[in-house]
Image (cartoon, rainbow, N blue to C red):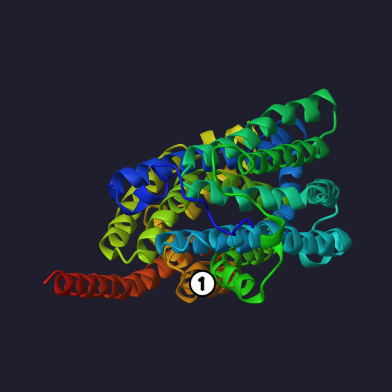
Amino acid sequence: MEQNVIHQADPIDPTDRIGTARVGKLLLDFSIPAIIGMMVNALYNIVDRIYVGQGVDPLGIAGITIAMPLMIILQASSMLIGVGANSLFSIRLGEGRRDVVEKIMGHAFALLFIIPGIVVTLLLIFTDRLLLDALGTSEAVFPYAKTYLRIILYGGIFSAMGPGINHFIRSDGHPRTSMLTQILGAGINIILDPIFIFGFGWGIAGAAWATIISQFISFVWVMYYFNSRHTRLRFRIRDMKLELNLALKIITIGFAPFAMQLAIGLVNIILNRALFRYGGDVAVSAMGIVYSIMVMIFMPLQGLNQGVQPIIGYNYGAKKYDRVLRAYKLAVVSGTIFVAMGFLVVQLFPRLFIAVFRNEQGPLMEMGSRALRICTIFLPFLAFQIISSNYFQAIGKPVQGTILSLSRQILFYIPLLLILPRIFGIYGVYSAMPAADSLSIILSAIVMIREIKRLKALEKQNSNTNDSVTV
């Protein structure tokens, strides 16, 4: 009878080196493909905005921006399962418990179908009411937002399952293959966008169709990988029969990034309403451009997070706490360098970046360039805050990760977003972001100082135990 295990293998298991190879080299090997993949993957919505802004209407950018909070809810449901299951997968590998990793994968597949499916159904039913009532969409922007969102939701299941399952390819020791998955989808999207928008004359609907077709192809590619000779891991029907304890464990670990995404969605709703109130449709379009630029700056950081996560998780499970701390510190330093470079460029040449989306002088250029400079003031310090939040999720401690994740978006940003615009108008809307960033960085420093002391104590205890055994 076939056992629910990974069969004894090839002479060299790709996951073994996570606990033995030099940490710096591991971080490069795992992060560079993830960074490239994330940078390319970020082009999904950014390319849509560029083509819509240049070839359709600036209000189309506002339409995509307004629809974004509801799309973020769908992304959050994918992260809840994909990131949670992947973290548990890495920890169990580090513990040497290879008998359960395929069961984790099977549960992830089932949950990635069920939970995003429910979210897609609800969003499709209530699209009009959500756009008009919750998001406060203007009459001019509503047709663009509705058209784009409904088409995106038609392919919502595949857009959730593809990225969710792709995490396992990286933790299986194949970060480059994971990168290729992201490049494949984004590359197809970039090719199809001008064909559908300009060639077929579909406008903003063409941008949406290009996105969901490319996401479906990515999903097919991911499933092909797990039926190929490149891995011994397989999705099996029996592993998809949900066990409550394991499903809850996956959801609990994945709750921090899930809550973070929901928080971002809520923030976007409040932000868009404030932008409408104090700056009108042009302010919404401008912030949509600013967010797109910031996404590109943050993508190397997200790639680092994805790359360091299996390294931290595996070594924490293996009780190699010195390697955990080394990986964390290297990720913080590397992330800070990446983000600082992006900060310098946007501060020096803000108009150049706005022109990529709409190359004409006017209110959009003026408002967008000012907003970009204000919103990015504390960017160089955010790498520490974001990687610290990811660290706790990687070691299977979702409570601390959730607190740090939500501090920036919920605890600080939302109150500031409600208070500052009443005093400073549209500039209060822009200033709320850097003010929240500074406060969340301070909180993260307090939490991580205690955590680093705990890790060092565990490592010392581990060393003493090993010495006693040797003696």
Q: Residue at x 66, y 72 (%)?
A: 243
- Which quadrant holds residue 441? bottom left
Whether residue 461 appears in this view of the structure is yes
Residue 431 on image: x %, y %: 51, 61
Residue 421 on image: x %, y %: 59, 67
Residue, far front:
1
- Residue type at numbered disc 1: Thr
Residue, far top:
199
Residue 291 on image: x %, y %: 58, 49
Please state which of residues 231 and 315 is positioned toward the viewer in this rendering: 231
Q: Residue at x 42, y 70 (%)?
A: 439
User: Split into 4 quadrants, where in the image is the C terminus?
Assistant: bottom left
- Which quadrant holds residue 183? top right
Q: Which residue is drawn at 59% across and 59% down?
A: 4
Whether residue 272 appears in this view of the structure is no
User: Split into 4 quadrants, where in the image is the N terminus?
Assistant: bottom right
Which residue carries the number 1 mark? 402
Please state which of residues 82 and 169 is positioned toward the viewer in this rendering: 169
45 in relation to 164, above or below:
above
374 in relation to 408, above or below:
above
30 in relation to 47, above or below:
below
Crowd class of label 1 (few under 14; some 14 to 19; many from 20; radius 10 Å): many
Horizontal arrangement in the rendering, residue 341 relative to residue 54 (left or right): left
SS at badge 1: helix
Q: Residue at x 51, y 64 (%)?
A: 88
Horizontal arrangement in the rendering, residue 153 relative to residue 162 (left or right): right
Residue 16 on image: x %, y %: 37, 50
